[in-house]
Structures are given as C-alpha cells and as structure tokens.
Amino acid sequence: MGRNLDPKCKQCRRFGEKLFLKGERCFGIKCAMVKKNYLPGLHGQKGFRRESEYAKQLQAKQKAKKIFRIQEKQFQNYFTKAGKMKGNISINLLTLLEKRLDNVIYRIGLAESRDKARQLVSHAHFYVNGKKVNIPSYELKEKDEITVREKSKSMSVFGGVFDNIKSSNIPEWLDYDGEKQIAKVVGEPGEKDFDQAIDARLIVEFYSR
C-alpha cells in the first residue's frame, strides 16, 4: 500500500464516524471525533453535506479501503475475486478482507491497529504454520496457526501485548492459546464478525454501475 499522508483523525472526521485507525487513542477523550465531531476544513462546522446515491456508494468503498488500509487496485482485485466465488458477493468480499494476515493479527489483539499489524507483519515478526510470512495481505485459511517469531517476543514492540489479550474480544472464528502463544483459524468469519462500519451492499452497487 502506498503511503496515505492524510492524517488518520481527519479521515474519521471526513466519514463522520470512528474508523478506529489509531488504536487506544480512539477510545479516549483525545479522539478527534470527541473533540471535533465535524468535517475537516474551513467550512466543516456547517454540518455534514447531503449526498447523492453515487456519493454514498463511493464513500462506502473509500471507507472500507481506509479501514483495511489498502489501495484501490488491490481493493478492486478483492472485489473481482469475491465475484468469482460461490455465494453472496458482499459476504465474500468482507470475508476475504477479514482473512488477511494483518487483520487477523489485529483481531487477535497482537497489534493495537491494522497499521501496526501491517508493520509488524512486514518486518517478519510472524510465522504461519512454522514458516515466516512478511506479506500483510497473506490470505489465511482454516487450521492455519500463527505464532510470533521467538526472538521477537522480547522486543519492545510486543511489550505487554501477550498479557493484555482478552479472549472475550477475539472473534469466534479465531482462537488464541495464551499459554502456548499460538493463534489459530478455526472457522470462517460470519456476518456478525464483519466491521459494522462497512456497507458492502453499497460497494457492490458502486462496482456494478
């Protein structure tokens, strides 16, 4: 993914809701959506503008890209792949996004944000089924096991992470063994596991124009 130079807090304000791009900060009073709950820019405080159907579709697509931190070409590829799969294209698309390695690292709680998870994966801190994987978009499948590289466990980037993982926050399609420090894919993500901020129906409508 190319660098997105637009400040994360402005991205949330532009969409009018929290996208949880900055980890713990998003849950505190310093969150921009608490302090400045209006559009960025000179005329932002005049309120959120009324949108056409096309604008809503475009915004839904852009929002999904921001949340999963991916670029247009890669997002189009996911949509194309989802369309070739059996079943509902909306569910297929969100399933593919959820099964990205960087997203799973985030969902488990090994990183406080998807950006951080992406960075950790790129720096080769994780193994999948015993093999080093440094591709954030790596697609996981059922029974895959994810472990942290042994010499990475004592690094500052993982300071306190293992002790703070809460099993109650982990989706049912994933499992984490705190004693062995092993994460495992035990099923497929369902509709209740998808990010509720994303309206995949509008995304499908956008690409189907």
Image: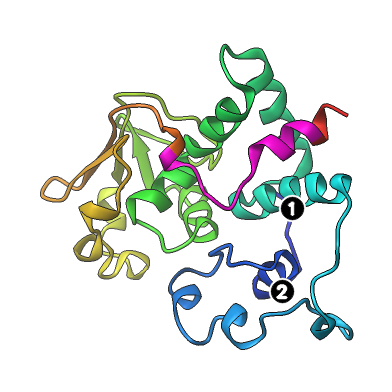
Residue under label 2: 10
Residue 8 figure quarter: bottom right
Q: Is residue 209 above or below residue 48?
A: above
Within 10 Å of disc 2 (Cα), the crowding (few <14, some 14-19, many 20+) is some
> Which amino acid, mark 2?
Lys
Q: Which mark is residue 2?
A: 1
Q: Which mark is residue 42?
A: none
Q: Mark 1, residues whose alpha carbon is within 10 Å: few (<14), some, or many (≥20)? A: few
Q: Which residues are magenta?
A: 192-205
Give whichever of 147, 33 is nearer the camera. 33
Q: Locate residue 61, reporting x and y percent.
A: 74, 45
Secondary element type, mark 1: loop
Query: Which mark lies nearer to you, 2 or 1?
Result: 2
Q: Nearer the viewer, residue 34 or 124?
A: 34
> Callout 1, which amino acid?
Gly
- Which residue shows up at 30% across the image and 31% down it? 130
Q: Is residue 201 magenta?
A: yes
Q: Is residue 178 left or right of residue 62?
A: left
Q: Position of residue 64 (x, y in %)?
A: 65, 48
